[in-house]
Image: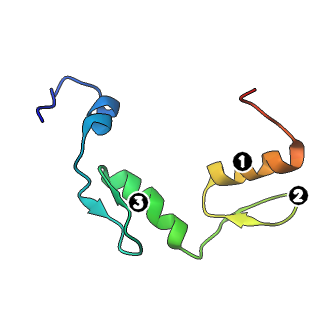
Amino acid sequence: MHVCPQKSRQVRIHLSLLRPYQCGHCSQSFSQPSDLRNHVVTHSSDRPFKCGYCGRAFAGATTLNNHIRTHTGEKPFK
């Protein structure tokens, strides 16, 4: 498949069928090295983001923010 170099990064990733970056912990693979780096954190025991409501810890800030909504009832997409 030919991918035009002028297309945005997002379009190139979407059109890409190649996923050469494979996780060493599981079978998941990625088209971008940054996606693999973000994924590998999920296998780590390091959980620096703690919930102020219940103390549960998460590897990433986004996951923590999604969890906090279970306490607050916030539904930002409705």
Secondary structure beneath disc 2? loop
Per the image, the residue denoted by label 1 is 65
Q: State the mark number for residue 53.
A: 2
Secondary structure beneath disc 1? helix
Q: Amino acid at mark 1?
A: Asn
Other residues around mark 1 within 10 Å, as few (<14) / some (14–19) / many (≥20): few
Left or right, residue 78 beside residue 46: right
Q: Amino acid at mark 3?
A: Arg
Q: Earlier in the sequence, mark 2 or mark 3?
A: 3
**Location of residue 53 by image quarter:** bottom right
**Location of residue 36 by image quarter:** bottom left
Question: Which residue is rendered at x = 84% and y = 58% of the image?
Answer: 52
Q: Earlier in the sequence, mark 3 or mark 1?
A: 3
Per the image, the residue denoted by label 3 is 37
Spatial CA span between label 3 and label 1: 20 Å
The image quadrant where one finds the C terminus is top right
How far across and how far down the image is residue 21, in percent? Answer: 28, 60
How far across and how far down the image is residue 68, in percent? Answer: 79, 50
Q: Amino acid at mark 2?
A: Tyr
**Location of residue 46 by image quarter:** bottom right
Q: Decide which of 37, 75 is in the foreground and name it.
A: 75
Other residues around mark 2 within 10 Å, as few (<14) / some (14–19) / many (≥20): few
Secondary structure beneath disc 3? helix
Question: Which residue is rendered at x = 24% and y = 24% of the image?
Answer: 7
Spatial CA span between label 2 and label 1: 12 Å
Spatial CA span between label 2 and label 3: 29 Å
